[in-house]
Image: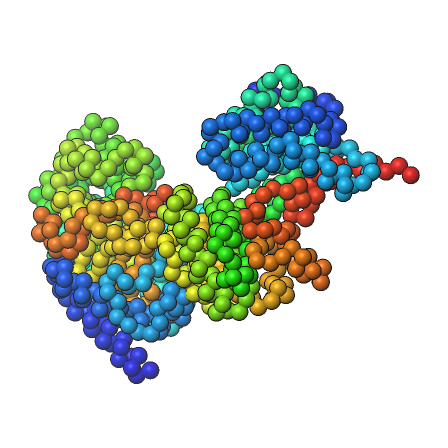
């Protein structure tokens, strides 16, 4: 069994060398220092400044945050005896450039050896990250990390995936449903497990009354937050809000929505969305197609960077959504009207004008068919070690019990 | 019901009277008023006959019959025809279904025609081509291999296009060999011999003409000189752009190497068969009396002035059996003038730069080809 992949770091070890190197302790000094050093190098690099998602990643990697992660992990697990699982094979998505680092670093912090596969589609963001990583890994002080981690790139090649799968203890698959299905056909060793992140759909929930009552700074905070949530990654991340649910009576909701979008349009006019002609056409196709199937109004907006489709009947219509600044909108009178909309594909709800207590009560009142996380508006894209319902720091470690 | 029939009859009369106008003889003001009026009627005709179309209009806030200015005629993205079968006729009036070809993973457009729309398409094509070819059928050399129309299983839109255009020629011969697509020099020589002193028609797909006809002949060193030939070609420039061949180079090369002095490209699509846009002697694509183009800014769909690139919207009076009278294409272009072409033809002129970046990929020589197909393919 052979396979061809390109290693993305200098002096990379072979698979055999990797397998024969011992795992590290969870939250080892070596790992913490490496992650923090990468954070510093990204903050210093002039290249990263153009990319808020890279700065967000660098911020997440700061030592202070890592220490907090460690404390949270210890709190959750009490005095359980946890050890790394071994080798974790990460298959990174092509739509969100920074995910591979989050996935890798959580596993690295657990002490695992890692193989990270990047898709053959590259981007400026990925290249900035890779060059910073390669530079650090070639330094003598990070030999311990370099020996235990392999970053590779290859096109669609089942042979390589089969080879890399055969040496891993956990396979982490990021990607669309098609990728997940395809990778699942490739066998894993009997003792290994898999965590897969399929296509997800996210929404924003805004209280119409709260919006109308809010003062200018609050409104501005919400719209800026929403802008970041929706427009970084061109609305193509799983957590990017695609459906805006207005909590309130229909006419009040429409009034609040019209005001809200005027503010968002103002933000957009001074920023670059990077959308192409094809994005604009795709949105027209998607909204016209939806109009044929269901009763909707395609609302006038400032320009095609915002395309609003108001749904008479609340629904997800996840199959119709193409991203790129397309927003389905609807109004519901009460939180409980959200329930019939939910299914397992719903991941993030970014909320505004509703309290966390209200949400907790709602979640406790009856089991939900979907939703993995609720975050205040503006934090939809924040990465968290609990993702899609999995506590990754826990999944990537193995518990040893002593009775 | 009666009033619906009445409306349909009035609409048909209006289209017929426009078709009776000289193809390139309608001055701008008159044309835009006439087109706006008939396209408005077509819009509401489709709204009453095609419920999914009516829903789209409603979603965009258009309700109740009201007149539109030409620029305000609602448009559908052409890709919708790939995902949906949109028809404005009862099933028993289906005369044929046009499809665009596509390579494996691609979806094809399905265009539903009744006898009336199909007849209009044929008439439109004849009236346009006669402006360039004259009324008599010319001896016709097809720049393709005979097999392209023979094997029904792999019958391509290219084949359909060739069949469609064959109606404009006589004594057809195929210039390429089946086995290797190389020029069939014997057939070509025989054809030229037989029609010495006559005007002849050459037709082929742009890349076939370049890659399998012009280049091999040039490379072989054989000298071939047509006396009086007109070449009509279509199918898009994508393949040739890779070799940095543009229209001007294409024309100059064919003239120099083969003495083909009249070369006309055309732009059109299966979703609006018949109303094709022919390139004149000055290299401009012309809109006929019964069709028009607008160029829109993708950023907000506003209509762009002359000389500014945007997405091309095509308007045509012909489609009454399906709501394809106003379509937003995925092609980038700009309009270059109106009633002011040195060739003397009236109507708006424009340029096409090719498909927008990152659009859904389509094969070459496919959709443009299907537009010419005649004879039922399916249905």
Q: Residue furthest right?
A: A403
Q: Please, is residue A315 above or below residue A123 in the view?
A: below
Instruction: Indicate the position of residue B17 as horizontal and vertical percent values.
Output: 16, 69
Q: Position of residue A5 (x, y in %)?
A: 57, 27
Residue B367's place in the image compared with A136, above or below, is: below
Instruction: Give residue A119's quadrant in the image.
Output: top right
Outermost residue to the top: A140
Percent across and percent down for residue B10 are 23, 76
| Residue located 20% across and 49% down the image | B306
Residue B168 higher or lower than A298, as above or below: above
Give the answer, above or below, for where A182 lies relative to B20: above
Res B365 seen here? no
How many dots with numbers?
0
At x 63%, y 37%, the residue is: A103
* x 52%, y 53%: residue: A218
Picture coordinates of residue A272, whole percent (x, y): 40, 43
Q: Residue at x 83, y 38 (%)?
A: A79
Query: Along the horizontal axis of the image, is B284 left or right of A96?
Result: left
Which quarter shows the C terminus of chain A?
top right
């Amino acid at each position: 069994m052979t396979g061809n992949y390109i290693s993305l770091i200098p002096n990379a070890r072979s698979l055999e060398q990797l397998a024969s190197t011992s795992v590290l302790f969870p939250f080892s000094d070596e790992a913490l220092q490496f992650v923090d050093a990468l954070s510093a190098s990204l903050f210093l690099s002039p290249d990263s400044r153009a990319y808020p998602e890279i700065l967000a990643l660098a911020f997440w990697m700061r030592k202070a945050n890592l220490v907090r992660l460690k404390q949270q992990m210890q709190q959750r697990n009490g005095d359980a005896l946890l050890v790394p699982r071994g080798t974790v094979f990460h298959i990174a998505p092509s739509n969100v450039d920074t995910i591979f680092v989050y996935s890798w670093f959580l596993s690295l912090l657990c002490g695992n050896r890692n193989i990270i596969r990047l898709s053959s589609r590259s981007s400026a963001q990925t290249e900035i990250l890779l060059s910073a990583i390669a530079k650090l890994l070639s330094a003598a002080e990070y030999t311990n990390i370099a020996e235990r981690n392999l970053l590779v790139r290859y096109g669609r090649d089942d042979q390589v995936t089969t080879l890399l799968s055969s040496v891993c203890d956990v396979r982490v698959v990021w990607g669309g449903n098609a990728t997940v299905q395809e990778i699942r056909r490739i066998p894993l060793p009997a003792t290994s497990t898999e965590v897969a992140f399929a296509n997800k759909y996210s929404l924003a929930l805004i209280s119409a009354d709260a919006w109308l009552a809010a003062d200018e700074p609050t409104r501005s905070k919400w719209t800026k937050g929403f802008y970041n949530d929706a427009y970084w990654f061109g609305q193509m991340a799983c957590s990017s809000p695609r459906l805006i649910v207005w909590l309130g009576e229909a006419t009040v909701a429409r009034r609040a929505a019209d005001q809200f979008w005027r503010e968002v349009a103002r933000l957009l006019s001074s920023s670059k969305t990077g959308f192409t002609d094809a994005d604009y056409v795709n949105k027209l196709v998607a909204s016209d197609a939806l109009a044929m199937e269901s009763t909707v109004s395609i609302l006038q907006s400032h320009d095609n960077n915002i395309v609003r489709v108001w749904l008479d009947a609340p629904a997800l219509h996840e199959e119709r959504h193409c991203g790129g600044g397309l927003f389905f909108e609807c109004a519901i009178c009460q939180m409980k009207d959200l329930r019939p909309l939910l299914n397992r594909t719903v991941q993030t709800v970014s909320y505004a004008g509703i309290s966390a207590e209200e949400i907790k009560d709602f979640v406790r009142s009856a089991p939900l068919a979907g939703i993995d996380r609720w975050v205040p508006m503006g934090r939809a894209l924040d990465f968290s070690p609990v993702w899609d319902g999995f506590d990754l720091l826990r999944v990537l470690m193995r518990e040893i019990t002593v009775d | 019901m009666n009033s619906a029939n009445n409306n349909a009859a009035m609409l048909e009369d209006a289209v017929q009277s426009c078709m009776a106008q000289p193809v390139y003889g309608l001055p701008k003001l008159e044309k835009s008023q006439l087109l706006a009026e008939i396209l408005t009627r077509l819009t509401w005709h489709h709204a009453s006959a095609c419920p999914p179309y009516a829903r789209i209009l409603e979603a965009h806030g258009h309700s109740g019959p009201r007149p539109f200015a030409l620029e305000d005629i609602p448009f559908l993205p052409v890709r919708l025809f790939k995902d949906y079968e949109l028809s404005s006729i009862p099933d028993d009036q289906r005369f044929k279904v046009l499809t665009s070809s596509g390579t494996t993973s691609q979806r094809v457009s399905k265009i539903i025609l009744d006898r009336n729309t199909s007849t209009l398409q044929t008439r439109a094509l004849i009236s346009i081509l006669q402006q360039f070819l004259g009324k008599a059928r010319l001896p016709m050399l097809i720049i393709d291999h005979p097999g392209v129309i023979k094997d029904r299983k792999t019958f391509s839109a290219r084949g359909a296009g060739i069949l469609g255009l064959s109606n404009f020629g006589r004594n057809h011969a195929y210039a390429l060999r089946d086995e290797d697509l190389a020029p069939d020099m014997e057939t070509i020589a025989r054809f030229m011999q037989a029609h010495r002193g006559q005007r002849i028609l050459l037709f082929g797909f742009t890349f076939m003409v370049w890659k399998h006809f012009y280049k091999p002949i040039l490379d072989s060193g054989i000298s071939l000189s047509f006396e009086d030939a007109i070449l009509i070609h279509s199918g898009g420039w994508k393949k040739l752009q890779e070799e940095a061949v543009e229209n001007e180079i294409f024309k100059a090369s064919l003239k120099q190497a083969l003495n083909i002095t009249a070369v006309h490209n055309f732009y059109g699509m299966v979703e609006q068969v018949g109303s094709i846009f022919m390139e004149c002697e000055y290299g401009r694509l012309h809109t006929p009396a019964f069709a028009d183009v607008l160029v829109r800014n993708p950023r907000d769909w506003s209509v762009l002035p002359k000389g500014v690139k945007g997405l091309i919207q095509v308007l045509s009076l012909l489609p009454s059996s399906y709501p394809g009278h106003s379509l937003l294409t995925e092609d980038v272009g700009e309009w270059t003038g109106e009633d002011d072409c040195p060739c003397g033809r009236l109507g708006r002129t424009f340029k096409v730069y090719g498909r927008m970046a990152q659009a859904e990929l389509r094969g070459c020589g496919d959709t443009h080809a299907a537009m010419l197909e005649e004879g039922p393919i399916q249905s």
